[in-house]
Amino acid sequence: MKKLYILLLALCFANFSYAQQTPADKQSQAISIEGATAHLGNGEVIENALIMFENGKLTFVGSANAKIARKGTVIDAKGKHVYPGFIAPNSTLGLVEVDAVRASDDDDEVGTMNPHVRSIIAYNTESKVVESMRPNGVLMAQITPRGGRISGTSSIVQLDAWNWEDAVIKQDDGIHLNWPRTYSRGRWWLGEPNVLKENKDYAKEVEELNHFFAQSKAYLASNKSPKNLPFEALQGLTEGSKKLFIHVDNEKGITDAINFANTQNIKNIVIVGGYEANNVSDLLKQHNIPVLLQRVHSRPNGDDHDYDLPYKLATQLVNSGVLVGLENAGDMERMNTRNLPFLAGTTVAYGLSKEQALSLITLNTAKILGIDNTVGSLEVGKDATLFISEGDALDMRTNKLSKAYIQGRDISLETHQTELYKRYSAKYKQ
């Protein structure tokens, strides 16, 4: 028993030593950042800028030449750059810690139609993966469930908090629907040829969705007895208080999904993925439907597609007048979310300006998620969620943060990874 107690004590200390950094205290005094190049997120750039914030809110954004008294702590940021905090939509951050450990995996619920499943209550603020986002400027995320036809309801959080209640920026912002596939590839693990084949159940699966939404409308118009949580969760879609995020890639699927939303009188929809959205850009613009575009750093899906199609999709959609944000779902998506700014950087090499690319992960995404009244750009009255970088934050060679703030709080940029970096840097300098 004595040995068992010693082992348990050792495990407790081990877990404590690898816990996330302590969340920052509430802002207690004003801060003025002077001399930096400020990238506001709305396309505007201010050289030799002055950024001031107090009580978690931006109080001045303008030129350092302005005759205005500097308040509180003054940070000399000459030669550096200031950016609004980056936003990672459609993310499973905090829902899975280690893929191989089932007890730490909570991104998928049993069942097919789960609009009532709320991802926010499973969000783990102690996640070491979440912590590793901040040194690259990713300070906010939309925590999104996976699986089923209707995965559940997402919420938007800031990434420095004691618990999910403290983390919430917008709770239950939208419902996520995985649109039926029109085509699929053969399952190689079953010996099937790796070629596209038609989904013969496509029409049936779409009809099941229509039937489910029709049942929901009938329930909501009744006395609601007995209580049906999935149907009640859909009420916000027709009222406009929630958005419907439709995960779909191909041209026919996108077109059918838009028609479905119109038929069901759903006021706000967002296309997530949108690999062939460039083929229906006029339709998207006509209905004012934004796109959270799939991971830029990926290969083309079709044999006859341009080799660089994923790289230039954002430029094509932006030039067509579609509101575009970037998301990073896919293989190893949680740890790869820290590369979000570099996805935006790649779009610069394929036609966008740096400020347009910046908007893809700041103001555009904030507009798509419905949080642009508080975050997404450096504007007076918005949250002081921003960071100072020694160089271009969209370039992995120069994205090096010296300070980061969430709602005015001076957050830690230390992570398990930075600790290992310092440890082994010291080793190899010996």
Image (cartoon, rainbow, N blue to C red):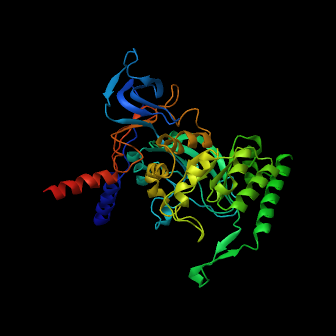
**Residue 56: x percent and y percent?**
46, 29
Q: Is residue 158 left or right of residue 282?
A: left
Number of marks in the rendered image:
0
Q: Nearer the viewer, residue 402 or 415?
A: 402
Q: Along the line of sight, which residue is nearer the eye, 415 or 223?
A: 415
Residue 392 in sight here: yes
Residue 17 visible in this rendered orientation of the protein: no
Front-most of residues 14 and 63? 63
Q: Nearer the viewer, residue 414 or 86?
A: 86
In the rendered image, which quarter contains the C terminus?
Answer: bottom left
Place of residue 38 in the rendered image (x, y in percent of width and height, measured from the top left): 42, 32
Q: Is residue 341 above or below residue 99?
A: above
Task: Give the image location of residue 214, x and y in percent.
Answer: 83, 54
Horizontally, residue 183 falls left or right of residue 217, namely left
Residue 370, quarter of the rendered image? top right
Q: Position of residue 189 (x, y in %)?
A: 56, 81
Q: Is the residue 16 above or below the residue 195 in the image?
A: above
In the image as oriented, which residue stretches furthest toward the bottom? 191
Q: Residue at x 79, y 68 (%)?
A: 204
